[in-house]
Structures are given as C-alpha cells and as structure tokens.
Image (spheres, rainbow, N blue to C red):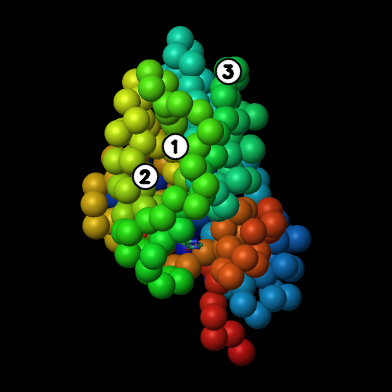
Amino acid sequence: MAVDDESGSGEAAAGPGVTRWIDPNPTELAAVTADPHLGEVVVGAEALARRIAELGAEISADYADTPVLLVGVLKGAFMFMADLSRAIDLPVEFDFMAVASYGNATKSSGVVRIVKDLDVDLSGRHVLIVEDIIDSGLTLAYLRKNLLARHPASVEVCALLVRDGLQKSDPDLRYVGFRIPPEFVVGYGLDVAERYRGLPFIATYQEDAT
Ligand code: IMP
Ligand code: MG
C-alpha cells in the first residue's frame, strides 16, 4: 500500500518532497487488482476532480481580464484539457498540437517533431499550454521555444503531473496538478502503446507483470 502525503489531506504538497497521492475508491482498487500490469492508484478520480477544480479557480482568477487560449498537447492531455476547461469560469478558446519525440518509447530525446500544428495565429495571444506530464522537461522546452517564436503576448504552462526530480531543464511551470514519484503511469489520457488512455484515474504501470 502506498504511503500518504504528510498533510494526509489530499492537498498539494507544499514542499519539494515527492508526494504519492492516494484516494482510490473501491472500483479503482478492483480495476488495478484485476489487471496485472497496473500497480497502484497514484491519483484517484476524486482527487483529480478536486485538484482540477482548484486549478480552474486559480486560472479563472489569474486570467479574469485576459482572454486566454488553451493549447492542448495531444494526445495525452485531451482528458485533462476537457475537464480543466470546464473548471475555468471564463470564455476560453481552444487549440491543439500533436508532437512526437524522436527518442525511444520511454525516454525523451528532446528532439520533437510537430505532427499536428496549431490552427490559430498566436501573435498577441495569451497562451496556456496544457500538458499531461512533465518528465525530463525536454518536450516542453521545445514547445515553449517554438510557441514563443510566434510572438504571443504570454506563454504559461499548466501540467497535470510532474515526475519529480528528473527535469533536465527548468520547466518553469505556472500550474501543477500533482508531483508524482518516478514511476511510469497510465490513465486519464496517458498511455502505454495507446492503451489505458480511457482509465478515469492514474495508476502505475508495470511491464513485467506476472
Ligand atoms: P519529457 O520530454 O521527458 O518531459 O516527456 C514528456 C512526454 O512523455 C509526455 O508529454 C508524455 O507524452 C510522455 N510521458 C512521460 N512520462 C510518461 C508516463 O509516465 N506515462 C505516459 N506518458 C509519459
Ligand atoms: Mg505528451
């Protein structure tokens, strides 16, 4: 069983420590038990909803007088983007980008290929990049540089997950959902070989399950 965070309250960890989030309901526990590839529930659906409501309120306050364009990074961020946008009490606009890393499946090379580019012109726009997970930070560093070259008024980042301690470049994240331990996770948009994106919660994935 996972250890709870210090506060035990399900609130975001304030310090630099790695926090394991557990708030699994019986359905989620049954789902990870039934699938040998799923380990533990890292963030349950209820904790996701609570935290996303907080992020939405924060973004609503920060952008109250500023029209914001949400830029979702496909495919991983699609579910987070859908829920986050409904938690933002402002008339936001949407666009999406799809990127592919040239690295191998589990390690980012930092060399990124744009598979689908944005439709809208970013000049003078306030952009909020919506990402699923920051691992090395290399994908985000590339994206930020690429978008900044299009002369937006501002570029900020909202990442649902940050895998602690592995960032090679300073990711400068304005909004973070959860800092998670250094384990591969799936669910809530995140996949392994296109599987598990539809899980309504986030769980660890173990390849060599017996
Ligand atoms: P980075 O460039 O190393 O920060 O990698 C970020 C990207 O790798 C994310 O946008 C995800 O698409 C993918 N990724 C990193 N860690 C995970 C994981 O635990 N599960 C699923 N995808 C991941
Ligand atoms: Mg991604």
Q: Earlier in the sequence, mark 1 or mark 3?
A: 3
Report if residue 133 is visible in the image. no
Q: Earlier in the sequence, mark 3 or mark 2?
A: 3
Residue 33 on image: x %, y %: 69, 74
Q: In the drawing, does residue 174 fall left or right of residue 202?
A: left
Residue indicated by mark 2:
143
Q: In the drawing, does residue 46 fall left or right of residue 73?
A: right
As measured in the structure, the alpha-carbon distance from the residue carrying label 2 to the one carrying label 1 is: 9 Å
Residue indicated by mark 1:
129
Numbered disc 1: secondary structure: strand
Report if residue 101 is visible in the image. yes
Numbered disc 3: secondary structure: loop
Of all residues, the one furthest to the top in this rendering is 65
Q: Is residue 29 above or below residue 45?
A: below
Q: Earlier in the sequence, mark 2 or mark 1?
A: 1
Image disc number at residue 90? 3
| Cβ atoms at labels 2 and 1 below 8 Å apart | yes
**Residue appearing at x 65%, y 80% in the figure:** 36
Q: Is residue 172 above or below residue 198?
A: above
Quarter of the render that holds ligand 1: bottom left
Q: Nearer the viewer, mark 3 or mark 2?
A: 2
- Image quarter where the N terminus lies is bottom right
The quadrant where residue 124 appears: top left
Image disc number at residue 37? none
**Residue appearing at x 31%, y 59% in the figure:** 110
